[in-house]
Amino acid sequence: MASRQRDQMRWTSLWAGLIVLAACALAVASPGSLPTRLQAFRVVATFLLVGGALRLSSGPARLGCAAAWLALMLLQPVPLVAEEWGRDFTTFYQGARLLFGAHQSPYAAPGATAFPFPTFLLVDLVSLNGGLSQAQSFRLFYALEALALGIGLVLFVWAAGRTVWAARAPQSAEALLVAGLALQPPILAGLAWGNSGALGGAAIMGAFAAWQGGRSRISLHGAAICLTLAWMIKPQLAMAAAFFLASALVEQRRTDRSRAAEIGRLALPWAAAMLLASLPLGWPGSLHAYRAFGPVAFTWHTEVAQRYFNNLALSLRIADGLKEAGGRPMATHLPLLAAVPAALILLANLRSLVRGSRDSALAFLPWLLASLLWTSLVWDWYLTLVLTAPLYMVSLAVRNPGRRAPIKLAAGIACCTVAAASVFCFGLLLLYVHALEIRGDDAAHLPALAEGIPIAT
């Protein structure tokens, strides 16, 4: 049974691998997709150093590679000029003032696209309802995001200590690799922009910790709350939330439901409660905001997405590649070009869902990484949203030195350290395919990790 399951999952990963090759062939053809010399150096150095930390047989050599990579990440400047610091926060601040100060739709502010709740509310609280200047509010928001990300990492380490790390001896290179992943240029760039990605990523880490590390029903509610906040902060994470909803749907007739399914059952009521609770906070502006969000999001994911050269979404790369190959402006068909890979990725995720334990953390990783593959608007700092996935996969690889070291993992991490279009997309796809593969292997090779923690009775 385990062998058949593993073979089926390998066919799924092979199918996904073919999609990777086709997508990247088109993406490379898109203008401005190739990395600069400095970016190419960072990719190659990261691949060699992270690969060495994962693959070398000598403990001191692995430690040396991990330390060298952490130093490389620390030496990289934040890839923003002074004028760009806090630019995303400007839209949050102006939108919050419109919503809670003038009780109008926040989307009248230029560039405002955040979901009506909870980002604008949080910014309003940070600014003391407009009592602080935008610059002062940004400094507090920056500190809050950094703190949230730090707490999220602590929660991840705690939860992983009860699953992957509990069954394997600790490795000295592991902490350095985890630190390097958290200090990558895209992660730091998101903080500097004042983007809310760090909050979304921290919320996912909180949901992961409550799901994998908790034992009581209270932890299930905590996971559902964090998961709901995550996709509200960044709607791209709806794909990650879909894992729990799909688990609940698959297990709807079972009495011994997994924790993942229970979280899915709780997520919808919590989402409804948050939406209802948010309405009176900025009334009637909040009502206007919910009405306007759909058209605003559609515009940004179609017309606006096409205009930004630093949009790294897979669908836009494919559109640009088709334009270069056929000489036709394919970007006008961006919604369709986004829907096709999204549908294929969803099918691959559903196929992985129905086999093996749904309370294995490995079951969640493809869905989380797909959060940056199904959407038509992706910035490099959105890597923070899915940071839990490479963190877990690196820890798993370091703790299993006897297995074949994953080349795709090192290459995927390396490519995601730069904002070159085809390289970043390629890195995400490599990580996604690797997540599908280890999901297929968990029942046969990692039985201790495939079983979730049962709900306390």
Image (spheres, rainbow, N blue to C red):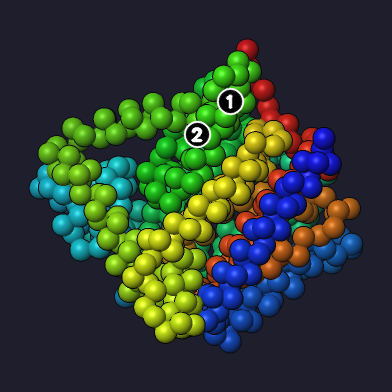
Bin the neighbour count of mark 2 within 10 Å (Cα to Cα): few under 14, some 14-19, many 20 and up: many
Question: Compared with residue 104, is residue 73 higher up or lower down, i.e. above or below?
Answer: below
Tell me what residue is drawn at x 43 percent, y 51 percent. 236
Name the residue carrying label 2: 245
Name the residue carrying label 1: 251
Secondary structure at numbered mark 2: helix
Secondary structure at numbered mark 1: loop
Question: Compared with residue 89, is residue 217 higher up or lower down, i.e. above or below?
Answer: above
Residue type at tag 1? Glu
Tell me what residue is drawn at x 82 percent, y 38 percent. 2
The image quadrant where one finds the C terminus is: top right
Q: Is residue 176 visible?
A: no
Residue type at tag 2? Leu
Q: How many marks?
A: 2
Q: Quadrant of residue 406?
A: bottom right
The image quadrant where one finds the N terminus is: top right
Mark 2 touching mark 1, by CB under 8 A?
Answer: no
Residue 44 image position (x, y, % from top left): 68, 78
Tell me what residue is drawn at x 18 percent, y 59 percent. 109
Image-based side of 344 in relation to 158, left or right: left
Q: Is residue 410 visible?
A: yes
Image-based side of 136 in relation to 285, left or right: right
Question: Compared with residue 52, is residue 343 higher up or lower down, i.e. above or below?
Answer: above
Residue 177 image position (x, y, % from top left): 69, 59
Q: Nearer the viewer, residue 426 or 27?
A: 27
Image-based side of 293 in relation to 147, left or right: left
Tell me what residue is drawn at x 56 percent, y 69 percent. 23
Residue 79 image position (x, y, % from top left): 46, 75
Bin the neighbour count of mark 1 within 10 Å (Cα to Cα): few under 14, some 14-19, many 20 and up: some
Q: Nearer the viewer, residue 353 or 122?
A: 353
> Residue 128 got which mark?
none
